[in-house]
């Protein structure tokens, strides 16, 4: 018997500044982000992307990404539909978050869900870093 629905696994989720595609179809991730360093808060990021790669599933699915502030407030939510025809296929989704405001410093969370089932949650610290004084070294 061939299954008609298998919930996929998330192979990776990366926050970055941009995603480009080569002529070959391969993706280039630009500026993979571990920590967001800013001169002050609140601050608005003009454009951030989250790239997710799904595998080992069969069926039609809805991916949901939530960005959660340190106080637990959902500050942004994106949903996308995708399909996997058999377990050997992969789906790569690039989610663009334009004008994403970070109201305070602290540890934000990115949650990745498929059909309302949490598959991954990871921290994204937002740190205020003082600008260097003329002729001086930066301080944290």
Image (cartoon, rainbow, N blue to C red):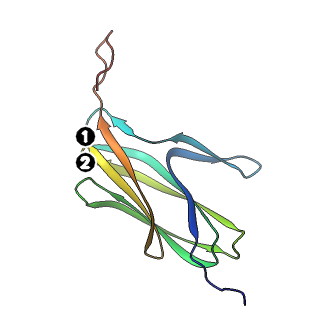
- In which quadrant of the rendered view does residue 128 lie? top left
57 displayed left or right of 88: left
Q: Secondary structure at mark 2?
A: loop
Cα–Cα span, label 2 and label 1: 6 Å
Q: Is label 2 in contact with label 1 (beta carbons under 8 Å)?
A: yes
Q: Is residue 117 left or right of residue 84?
A: left
Q: Kindly identify which residue carries mark 1.
A: 41
Q: Which corner quadrant of the image does residue 106 belong to?
A: top left
Q: Secondary structure at mark 1?
A: loop
Q: Judge the density around disc 2: few (<14), some (14-19), many (≥20) Cα neighbours within 10 Å.
A: some
Residue in the picture at 56% in, 76% down? 7
Give the residue displayed 32% in from the left and 51% down from the top: 108
Instruction: In the rendered view, tell whether residue 54 sits above or below residue 17.
Output: below
Between 99 and 105, the one lying in front of the other is 105
Instruction: Answer left or right for 123 relative to 31.
Output: left
Question: Furthest-bottom residue in view?
Answer: 1
In this view, the residue farthest toward the front is 1
The dot on residue 103 is 2
Counting from the top left corner in percent of width and height, residue 60 is at 59, 79
Q: Identify the mark nearer the N-term, 2 or 1.
A: 1
Task: Give residue 75's position: percent from left, percent from top.
Answer: 31, 58
Percent across and percent down for residue 63 are: 50, 69
Could you say which disc has been placed on residue 68 in the image?
none
> Residue at point 33% right, 45% down?
44
For the N terminus, give its image quadrant.
bottom right
Instruction: Give residue 31's position: percent from left, percent from top.
Output: 52, 39
């Amino acid at each position: 018997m061939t299954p008609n629905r298998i919930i996929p696994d998330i192979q990776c989720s990366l926050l970055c500044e941009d995603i480009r595609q080569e002529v070959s179809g391969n993706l280039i991730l630009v500026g993979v982000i571990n920590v967001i360093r800013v001169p002050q808060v609140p601050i608005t990021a003009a454009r951030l992307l989250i790239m997710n790669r799904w595998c080992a599933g069969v069926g039609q699915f809805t991916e949901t990404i939530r960005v959660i502030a340190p106080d637990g407030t959902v500050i942004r939510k994106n949903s996308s539909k995708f399909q996997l025809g058999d377990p050997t296929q992969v789906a790569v989704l690039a989610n663009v978050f334009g004008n994403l405001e970070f109201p305070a410093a602290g540890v934000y969370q990115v949650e990745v869900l498929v059909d309302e089932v949490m598959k991954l949650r990871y921290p994204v610290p937002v740190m205020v870093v003082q600008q260097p004084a003329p002729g001086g070294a930066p301080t944290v």
